[in-house]
Image: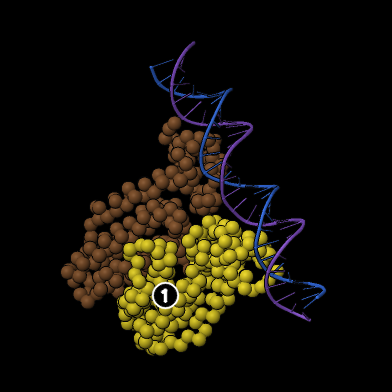
Chain colours: A brown, B yellow, C blue, D purple
Amino acid sequence: MATQQTDEKIIKAFSKLVLKLGYQGTTTKRIASEAGVNESTIFRHFKDKHSILEQLVNTYSRDIEQIGQSFEFTGDIVQDLMRVATIYHDFVANHQVVFLLGLRESYRFPEIGQALRQLPKRFKNLVVTNFNEMVEAGEIRATANVTEEATNFILLNFGNAVFTYAYPTARLQVPMKAFLAENIRTFAEHLQ
Amino acid sequence: MATQQTDEKIIKAFSKLVLKLGYQGTTTKRIASEAGVNESTIFRHFKDKHSILEQLVNTYSRDIEQIGQSFEFTGDIVQDLMRVATIYHDFVANHQVVFLLGLRESYRFPEIGQALRQLPKRFKNLVVTNFNEMVEAGEIRATANVTEEATNFILLNFGNAVFTYAYPTARLQVPMKAFLAENIRTFAEHLQ
DNA sequence: AATAAATGCAAGCAAGTACTTGCATGCATA
DNA sequence: TATGCATGCAAGTACTTGCTTGCATTTATT
């Protein structure tokens, strides 16, 4: 029942369609057509439609654990925050489907919400660790409230990501590169 | 075909259900039951299901134009930003349904996306105006990049709103009052 | 009391949905 | 060449959805 090639075709089609049409709009017939596969074949590879999503969420969760494992702080706050932000946005870009489905359908699929929540958690830890080291090193002034600053940093990046992927046509949107180079820098400099 | 009372019952039921069940999950049969009204009555008041949503979006758009019309800056940046943030979050709280539907379904209903985009625009204008005055008044240092700071401010608030309403059960979430009192203050103080 | 408007009720329709089934066909491996 | 596996194909099932219709009943207005 499983040539991996077909699995991938289905997942790829599913992903592409979900971005355009949402979960419900992504019907099994459309998936089949987009994947160049018969509808019945989908159900030979996946128990049901929901399992396709499940597989994507699993990948997402597995990838989350890799985040920041080999991250080395440079000691320069501006550089460090820019790198953290870059990692964050790369991750979201590579998991757009789960990210968006989490926004749109987490009320219906609690497990996605569950998995999604790990992301800010993980990044907040990373940032808090960094901030604490920086305070000790004198790179951040001692009066700074580390927790709030870290939260603000995450919310800023999260807000930008939602804007970028949920409203691809909006105007406020800052191109990602400029956002990382300028807005994150602005934020970081405030801490010094 | 129109006693306003019934109109309101339907809209209220629709709103309540959409928050829990999303647009597609909010079936006309459920609306009827929640509103205590016969299903056919819904279609005597609204052309179709989508028109219920339309009416909410119209209200949203009308209300947006009121924002900031009578806003007077105090000259104290911390206070001003806290007030702007409060107005923002009150607005979102009063229009949760449209805000959430915009997040979830704007790919399907472009008009909602359209209406939603006015909100950050409007607020960004408000903030930029304020910032420019503050720079002249010496309340914000002249070296500050007004546009980026304003964008960051909006994204911060937006991110927090999305977190609050899209993931009501998440843990990173900062209670709104604390967010306004502390995180916004932290942000504002950086500008001085 | 008489008229008209708003609603309830019950049945139903057309279209779409996820998913199934039985069989024929192609393809690779042994 | 023969066997088995993955797929295509076509038809169909059971269910849900938005929406309609015809008629009886209530409610408000004059």
Residue drawn at (29%, 70%) of the image: A149
Residue A188 rendering spot, x and y as whole percentages: 30, 69
Q: B16 or A102, which lies in front?
A: B16
Q: Which residue is mark 1?
A: B150
Question: Is residue D13 positioned above or below A150 on the image?
Answer: above
Determine the chain carrying the residue at label 1: B
Q: C16 or B20, which lies in front?
A: B20
| Residue neighbourhood size for the residue with mark 1, other residues' Cα within 10 Å, grouped as few (<14), some (14–19), many (≥20) | many
Residue drawn at (23%, 67%) of the image: A131
Residue A138 rendering spot, x and y as whole percentages: 18, 71
Which corner quadrant holds the N terminus of chain B? bottom right
Q: Is residue A157 left or right of residue A16?
A: left
Residue drawn at (40%, 62%) of the image: B167
Question: Is residue B10 positioned above or below D13 on the image?
Answer: below
Q: Amino acid at mark 1?
A: Ala
Q: Is residue B50 visible?
A: no
